[in-house]
Image (cartoon, rainbow, N blue to C red):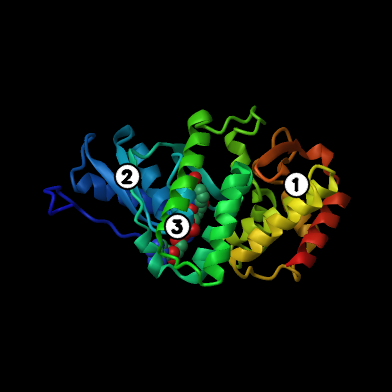
Amino acid sequence: LQASDFVVSQLLIGDGERFKTLGTAEHAIGQLSEAGLERNDAVLALGGGVVGDLTGFVASVYLRGIAFIQAPTTLLAQIDASIGGKTAVNSPLGKNLIGSFHQPSVVLIDIETLSSLPSRELVAGFCECVKQATVASRKLFVETRDFLDRLRSNRVPLISTELQKLIAKHCSFKASIVAGDAQESISRTDRRSRRILNFGHTVGHALEAVTGYRRFRHGEAVGLGMLVAGELSKNLGLLEELELKSLREAIRLCGPLPRVDDLDEDTILDLISRDKKSLSGQVQWVLLESIGHARILDGKHVTRRLLKHSLRSSWREI
Ligand SMILES: NC(=O)c1ccc[n+]([C@@H]2O[C@H](COP(=O)([O-])OP(=O)(O)OC[C@H]3O[C@@H](n4cnc5c(N)ncnc54)[C@H](O)[C@@H]3O)[C@@H](O)[C@H]2O)c1
């Protein structure tokens, strides 16, 4: 940027979710002010989803909003977090509790950055790829699963044109959903509503919470959450067994997931019933009718007994 005559100042933040706070945002705003940033300047987020969410939030409130650019460096941030303009910081009362919608002006993705990404972060990112592909279309699902299959059998390197193309397809799918429902309308339940991107998240959030946000990377918890949502869809008679098998296989190809068999089912069920995406006290489930066809279902159709049974059967499959 300097070589292109931009005046640049840098700000580093601490690594990890625990730095995605109002305190860090306030510190960052102070730095922007000291550096003399004006309304026609921009902030660039270089990092994973934590940096992206925090930078977006700061850019949305500094001088009532300045431009920002996403340069995501994790797989999760490249296919998901950098696109769609959701910005947030955490509060002691909840994850992403304070935030805004502020679209980035540009998203710049260089997949070479992934060559240094730890393998667990890749597994988590691939789980998010599977999530997105499963609710997108059979075509994107098959392309994602085939890439994972070839990667796992060393028939394609990670840093490859194939991955670049796959990421571009994921970005364009997410952008198309966001373009039609930018603020995630709570009244929409159709297949193009932004809420379908929460597939796997109801159980995923409960798993993260029950382990104090210490055991799972977010994508890993979503991977496990998708197994339960798929099982539940089958048990409700919405999804064919064969489709569930394909979903399980794709999740397995993402890589090893942390153990869950030692977690208390009743605590997980209690947390699910308090999911923050609930509406009028009812959990809103994103379920599947087939690969590529999500369905949003009100929690009143899901009994605690059925959910417990689905949890148990999913855990047995891991
Ligand atoms: N805004 C959205 O729509 C949206 C969507 C999904 C997730 N999120 C948010 O994204 C965050 C999770 O993002 P994440 O998974 O990218 O986590 P992260 O930003 O914490 O990054 C994961 C780890 O990878 C490291 N890292 C980043 N890039 C690297 C690279 N190229 N090489 C080596 N290490 C690298 C980071 O320092 C960190 O330790 C959460 O806060 C979540 O709430 C936001």
Tally the marks: 3
Mark 2 crowd level (few <14, some 14–19, many ≥20, 10 Å Cα): many
Gap in angstroms between the C-alphas marked 3 and 1: 40 Å
For marks 3 and 1 on the same chain, the one whose residue lies earlier in the sequence: 3
Residue at 82 percent of width and 55 percent of height: 310
Instruction: Label 1: state its secondary structure.
Output: helix
Specify the quadrant that holds the C terminus.
Answer: bottom right
Residue at 62 percent of width and 70 percent of height: 256
Residue receiving disc 1: 273
- Asked whether, in this view, residue 179 is left or right of residue 269, the answer is left
For marks 3 and 2 on the same chain, the one whose residue lies earlier in the sequence: 2
Residue receiving disc 2: 69
Please state the horizontal and vertical placement of residue 116, each as a whole percent of the image.
Answer: 39, 69
Residue at 65 percent of width and 46 percent of height: 199
Instruction: Label 2: state its secondary structure.
Output: strand
Residue receiving disc 3: 162
Mark 1 crowd level (few <14, some 14–19, many ≥20, 10 Å Cα): some
Dot 3 and dot 2 residues touching (CB under 8 Å): no
| Callout 1 amino acid | Ser
